[in-house]
Amino acid sequence: MRLTALWALSESGLGGIMHAFKIPFTGFFLGGFAIVIITLIACYSQNRWKEISRATILVILIKAAVSPQSPPMAYLAVGFQGLAGALIFGAIGHNKSAAMLFGCIALFESAIQKFLVMTLIFGNSIWEALDLFFKGITKDLHLSNDFSFSFWLIAGYTFVYSIWGLVLGNWASKIPDHISKEAHQILADYKNMITIADKAPATSNFKKKGKWIATFFMLLFIISTFIILGSAHKALYAITRTIAALLLIFFIINPLVKWLLQLWIIRQKNKHAAGVSSLMDLLPELKNLVRPAFRLARAKHTGIYMYKQFVFTLLVLTLFANNE
């Protein structure tokens, strides 16, 4: 239950906390964080399919309650991660191979989802503009331009995500052993640490505004590329296509999906009312563990190892701090 609560905290508010600590690659990290949590749930569960499926439903319900402004694609990502984890760990069991396969598939979907959304909004114009822009650069530099830049961009991006998923799955499969060896020292350090009570930082709205800013500049890039290349009709098409897609998404698709999602949530709330209540009670406690976990990790490590230790320390405190 505490791991499920930590997953729910991550989906509903940990991103804002991480922004406050200036932790880079927040989105990249949060996607991987779900992989670690689901892998640990599989490790500590007798019925992996049932427990992961139940945890996924509870996380979606908490996310809907705490972050109702979340777009439908965010719920889709959580649902896919939970379903993939339940299927893979339920069929294969908890082992290194299953964890790596799950991590790879989960982050591959996360990467592909981004490009599908971009294509839905901008159409093929964005990829055509990127290819034309890159060909213009290679032509000026007298280099070969007989390949699709957009294809290799998508392929490289999804490859990096997939490899990151493999790395995370491999690491997550080893965490239970590390916990048994290092938990005692971490809990002792936590007990001895003097913390200053303060409010957890509020979630920033920058991410939401950032999406609109990114959309504006992408559209500006597409239009500018086509106009410079003398394809004003393609620029006009890109404008009308993008506006039409945004209107379709925000006034038809999103409301319809949210309405269907709310119907599902209402039905599920009756079945999982006790679980949702328990998780909501746990969220403030776990939120207060984020700052101590970060301080403990920063006291002993720097660079990327500090973030790795932060996740591990937070997991240990989540599982055992209430027993101290």
Image (cartoon, helix red, strand yellow):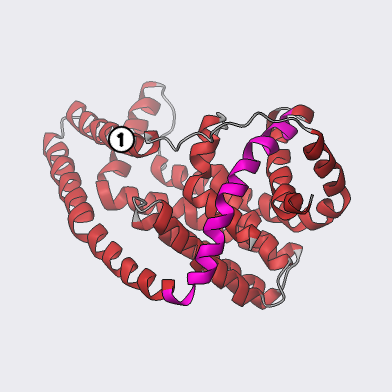
277 or 265: nearer the eye? 277
283 or 214: nearer the eye? 283
Q: Position of residue 21 (x, y in %)?
A: 57, 30
Q: Is residue 281 magenta?
A: yes
287 or 159: nearer the eye? 287
Left or right of 284, for residue 145: left
Query: Residue lying furthest top in this view?
Result: 140
Left or right of 192, for residue 295: left
Can you identify the residue that label 1 sits on? 132
Is residue 123 among what the camera can see?
no
Left or right of 131, for residue 224: left
Magenta region:
270-298
What is the magenta segment's predominant secondary structure?
A: helix
Number of on-image labels: 1
Q: Is residue 258 magenta?
A: no
Q: Position of residue 323 (x, y in %)?
A: 77, 54
Q: Residue at x 64, y 58 (%)?
A: 3
